[in-house]
Amino acid sequence: MTRQTAGGIPIACAFAPSHMTGFFALGMGTSYGAGITLSKGCATECRALAGKPGKAVFRINGKLVKKHETRVSRLVLRKFALLFPAFFKSNSLSIAHSHDFPCGFGMGSSASAALSLSLALNRLLGSPLSRAKAVKIAAEADLECGCGVLGVYASATGGFLAKKSPKSAVSRLLAQRGCTLLFGFLSPISTKAVLGNKKTMESIGRAGAPAAKEFFKAPTLYNLALVSNRFAIDSGIAKGKAKKLLLADRQCGMAMLGNTFFWVFPDMQSALLARKHYAKQFKKMELCSPSEKGAMLA
């Protein structure tokens, strides 16, 4: 049931966790690899307002943003508008995304924003769509904008997920209980630019299958970081300062796709000590834990 503010404004909220991919491989027209769903992500609040019908105002972490900063979310809106034209012709919307991680750094920000928006919009409309349909709309929007392939589905499912080969099913792996992940954010990478670069894609093609083989010898979060490190270097995705950092610390993995680095620690105390050690190297650092939970209404 849709909630209302004290002033009677209909409001709906949803949260979608970030899913970070450690490495990926390509084959038979699909992708496979491994990644982990995190306890942090994107929360979205939708409000139906009186005003100019069809207008949508977006905020990210409290700030008004330009259209190009919300391409995927606006495409989700357009897909809903095609399904429910009467609602969008008679209402304007206020949409607020609250991201725990910076956008463009390989933390699945577009996927978690699209999914949390799709779920919240569906609730605002009275839940006319099934959860599966709302997830599909978000996934299509993310893919059509060139931001990712399976990130939305991973965010919807939750957990430590891996796929061994193009033909195999997705496996749900066991993440070490109590472990903490530390992330260091250096700079963003354009997913579209990487996936559209023929030379880089050829390098990814050569590095991906060996990475998958090595990971499944010991499918743990610790090994994900090790395999991710080598994959980022061998594929050519890591360049310049990012490559130097990975070569200097082989325990450090790299998020796909972003100059974002991650370490896996057995507990929070170890991660906090490491954050003090690495703090000067990064613009921002975040701590979080693995999550078995997928996207949900709030």
Image (cartoon, grey):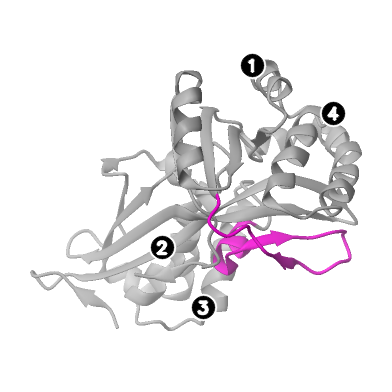
Which dot, 4 or 2, sits closer to the camera? 2
As drawn, the label of residue 241 is 1
Asked whether residue 75 appears in the rendered view, the answer is: no
Is the residue marked by circle 4 packed among few (<14), some (14-19), or many (20+) residues within 10 Å? few
Q: Residue furthest left?
A: 7
Q: Which residues are magenta?
A: 151-179
- On the image, the x and y values in percent for residue 223 come to 74, 46
Quick one: SS at disc 1?
A: helix
As drawn, the label of residue 15 is 2
Q: Which residue is mark 4?
A: 199
Separation of disc 4 and disc 1 at Cα?
20 Å
Q: Is residue 173 magenta?
A: yes
Is the residue marked by circle 3 packed among few (<14), some (14-19), or many (20+) residues within 10 Å? some
Asked whether residue 242 appears in the rendered view, the answer is: yes
Tell me where residue 265 sits by quadrant.
top right
Q: Nearer the viewer, residue 50 or 37?
A: 37
Quick one: quadrant of the C terminus? bottom left
Separation of disc 3 and disc 4 at Cα?
39 Å
Q: Earlier in the sequence, mark 4 or mark 2?
A: 2
Q: Earlier in the sequence, mark 1 or mark 3?
A: 3
Separation of disc 3 and disc 2 at Cα?
14 Å
Q: Which residue is mark 3?
A: 131
